[in-house]
Image (cartoon, rainbow, N blue to C red):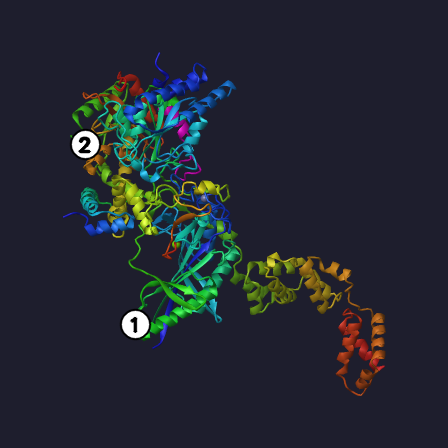
Amino acid sequence: MSKITREQVEYVAGLAQLELDDAAKARLQQEMGEILSYMDKLNELDTSNVEPMMHAMEMTNVFREDCAGESLAREAALRDAPQQDGEYFIVPKILDTEGGA
Amino acid sequence: MAAWHEKTAHEISSAVRGKQVSAVEVATSFLDRIAAVDGNVDAYTQVWPEYALAQAQAVDAKIARGEDPGILSGAPIGIKEVICTEQGYTTCSSKILEGYQSPYDATIIKKLAAAGAVFLGKLNMDEFAMGSSTENSAIKTTKNPWNLKCVPGGSSGGSAAAVSADMCTISLGSDTGGSIRQPACLCGCVGVKPTYGRVSRFGLVAFASSLDQIGPFSKDVEDAALALNVLCGKDPMDATSADLPVPDFTQALTGDIKGLRLGMPKQCFTEALGAEMREKVMAAIEVLKKQGAEVVEVSLPALDYALAVYYIICTAEASANLARFDGVRYGFRHPEAKDVREMYVKTKSAAFGPEVQRRIMLGTYVLSSGYYDAYYLKAQKVRRLIKEDFDRAFTQCDAIVTPTSPTPAFEFGSKTADPLEMYLSDIYTIATNLATLPGLSLPCGLCASGLPAGVQFMTKPFDESTLLRVAHCYEKNSGITLGKPPIA
Amino acid sequence: MEYEAVIGMEVHVEINTHSKIFCACSTAFNAPANTNVCPICLGMPGVLPVLNREMVNKSVAAGLALNCTISRWSKMDRKNYFYPDMAKNYQISQYDLPLCYKGRLDIEVDGQVKSIGITRAHMEEDTARNTHTLGGGISGVDFNRSGVPLLEIVTEPDLRSAQDAYAYLTTLKQILQYLDVSDCNMEEGSLRAEANISVHPKGSKEFGTKTEVKNVASFSGVAKAIEFEIARQIEVLESGGKISQETRGWDANRGITFSQRSKESAHDYRYFPEPDLMPIVVDEAWEQRIRKSLPELPLAKKRRFKEQYGLSDYDATVLTSTRAMADYLEAAVQAGADAKKAANWIMGDLQALLTDAKQEIQECKVPPAGLAEMIQLIESGTISGKIGKDVLVEMFASGKGPKAIVEEKGLVQITDEGALVAIVRKVLADNPQQVEQFKAGKDRVIGFLVGQVMKASRGKANPEKVNEILRKELSA
Ligand SMILES: [Mg+2]
Ligand SMILES: [Zn+2]
């Protein structure tokens, strides 16, 4: 029995915006299963009283001052875009109205 | 006299500054060397002859005007594909960034240029720095100069091979779990991963943000010190860069290690370590003992869990870091995308290689709803245990010594079938990244197969001086010279 | 059956820093597309964010004004999802440790004070703007807004009606403007409000299924949308239907909400701590520094205005509705004006002029000291109150001082007894019929005669004096 089901592989691929054919799904199910089983090793350790190490450095309050500086020229900003019209980055029509923030 | 391309950066810089040779002459020697041997090694993904010569001319012009171009005057340097440069392309050896031109230079590129360095071009790597053999490059396969049938290590395989084959004096790599030290070991050169926060990451395309660090490859420890003098220091563009004074690292190269306590973690010298590697590392320890080092056994009990912790944290961070490669603002976009979702899916699926996709999948999984606590949070907790192990060990010793890699360079294809086995190549190097420590690998002889072996040192955070002092002392007293790799 | 509505609000407020939250690009509104952008806010490879200190200062100020607890230790997190307006395909936001939490905002509805719980206020970055008007099956993305600093303010489900929501939004806006942390301009998108609405039978302890109403362009729109949504949900329940959890838009023209997107499955945002940014520690000293710098807030100012200046509750409310208006009144008083008189002028004639000119009080050409001077000219009898109105119009148009206008136009009130007697006698001579009528006991006609004197003096005669002299002359 693998650590991870085919449905889970498909769900994760959906989150990651990857498309997998049947062979890739089968391969990933097996590989991820093995790696995740290896990771289960961590359960040998009692970490109930351990603070997670959320940041690599102990520093706090690293800020920049609120000064508006120079921006990129628009041509430079758009230069490497696969599709642009001189003003906008162009993408296929967005139908969904899901907003960010 | 040796050709200029066989010399070190400190030799070249003092010769250029002393007007014994022009920077253009030096650059030409290296460009000729690349033309002669890189057809066999395939370290470079791009070579910039015109740009290199123009930079060399600028160095020469400064010297003619009586100005000092800096401590790396005329030293030819190669850059890993993962570091952003306005010159040429920054592809991370991935199809998804084919032809991508960065609109800005990484902070360290500006610093090196200001120190008089001459950039020769960019060096091959595992796609997005994910790998231990450079076999995951979408551009080409870099060979180990010591045996063209073997891998150069990875992910900075091109950077290691280029230094080892005299195609640059110093090269830049990035090290997330050993990506500088392991290829340095496999190719027989010096590789340093500085303390996390020591070198600005601004302009380093992120793989795992809390582990990545830029560092140099060089032919000797003095060049490593020279490079660190330029690379280290606070960068206001990187909130994780430390605001600490940077000493002159060359001052640490005293040769004197009397009374230095050298820690041997018992967990690193088990049966898992091959006999030949063990013998080489033990011999290196003997050399240091003779120089007055006191060897103490230390214990790092959480070390056994480092690999599991590493592959949870690095894949989780990578899954977010690589999300931006979506075909909207730069890079590849699949031509057949009818809607936005198809644009993402087809672009990513077509342009990310299998190892990158595997890691994105793993990282997405360990962060996903219901699994965060079991994997990601657990890994962060064990990461702290690992760091605390090292903190404890450094109360008993000043530096820790381990092998760099369990084995010397292996043949192409020998580990690609089993990702977990490939991940084990980094067994001795990843804990350094998890604990944010500085680490250094340097050659400690050739194996019977003719392939280099390496020894690794690490010290407390921000104590690169001790790291360099130990390594330099070993280098001076080991009596070992690898000689030149047997390439044309 | 009787129903009760439960409403919670989520408001995104743009914090008015000069530069973006993680880079030095300008936050200016309405720049040409993709000109306020740099590698950082475009999410280019290799870039790193650095947090804007002023964003933290202003967010803490807002949190304190909303009676929040300020986290001693908080952090930024990554919120992962794919969308073309997301430069990195993750948003840097705050997840489990917001900068401000557990606050409260008092609002007034129909004279009743209600306390609305503030769950949290956290810092995050804005996204880019998509445009769908380019035609040809494509959309355009403009990253100027990408990385503009936002404070997301979330309430407890403490609101019960559209009026509550309206009062909440106006009170919130008023406070944030007082603090000068946001322009709160809905048209420019610097304030965006979403409402979570559910209804349940009155008395029932359990809340109903909620819908989320988004993309409403004005406060009154939000109130109308909530009103509609409450009625719609009740109707659905009454007819035996079920409310489905979904996001609904607001069609302002038709006055209805409509289904935009059903919540297929809960989002899996895979939050994790942002490794590129260090934690934020707001210690006691920092918090106190900001607390001390907070301006007097609307409610306190209103109380003080009533007490100190003797203003009515209504007047005090109007005059503290914006900090600019309150500051204007206080500056006029400082310059010597009687507070009540200044208040009347500000709320009356000046406000009318401002409304006509579509101006804010801080933009107008009449300085508070000018208004005070004008009021003093009336008090001292130099001009009449009626002339004062004309003088203010001229001050508003030209920016000239009241004295200069009065002199230039010869508007000084005639109070000289001799001069007035001469005018009065002439008027009486010209209107014998009315004089007759007055003498026959028709007292009302005095008003006509005063008018004639005022007319003859071109408004400059002191009306009280005119009245007095007229009576004296008529009874002579
Ligand atoms: Mg939000
Ligand atoms: Zn920017």
Q: Quadrant of the C terminus of chain B?
A: top left
**In the structure shown, which secondary structural element does the residue marked by tag 2 occupy?**
loop
Q: Which residue is mark 1?
A: C241
Rendering coords of residue C263 (x, y %): 31, 60
**Residue B220 at least partly seen:** no
Residue contact between numbered discs 2 and 1, judged by CB atoms under 8 Å: no
**Relative to B449, residue B235 above or below:** below
Q: Secondary structure at mark 1?
A: loop
Residue C125 drawn at (x, y percent): 42, 50
- Would residue B132 be found to the left or right of residue B62 on screen? left
The three-letter amino acid code for the residue at tag 1 is Gly
Q: Is residue B267 left or right of residue B167?
A: left
Toward which corner of the image does residue B469 lie, by quadrant?
A: top left
**Residue C98: where, in percent of width, then height?**
38, 52
Residue B414 badge: 2
The boundaries of the magenta stretch are: B224-246
Q: Chain of mark 1?
A: C
Based on the picture, tell me whether residue C37 belongs to the magenta stretch.
no
Chain letter for mark 2, please. Answer: B
Q: Residue lying furthest top in this view?
A: B1
Q: Confirm whether residue C312 shows in the render.
A: yes
Q: Give above or below for B341 relative to C236.
A: above
Q: Residue at x 76, y 84 (%)?
A: C443
Q: Give left or right: position of A59 versus C219.
A: left
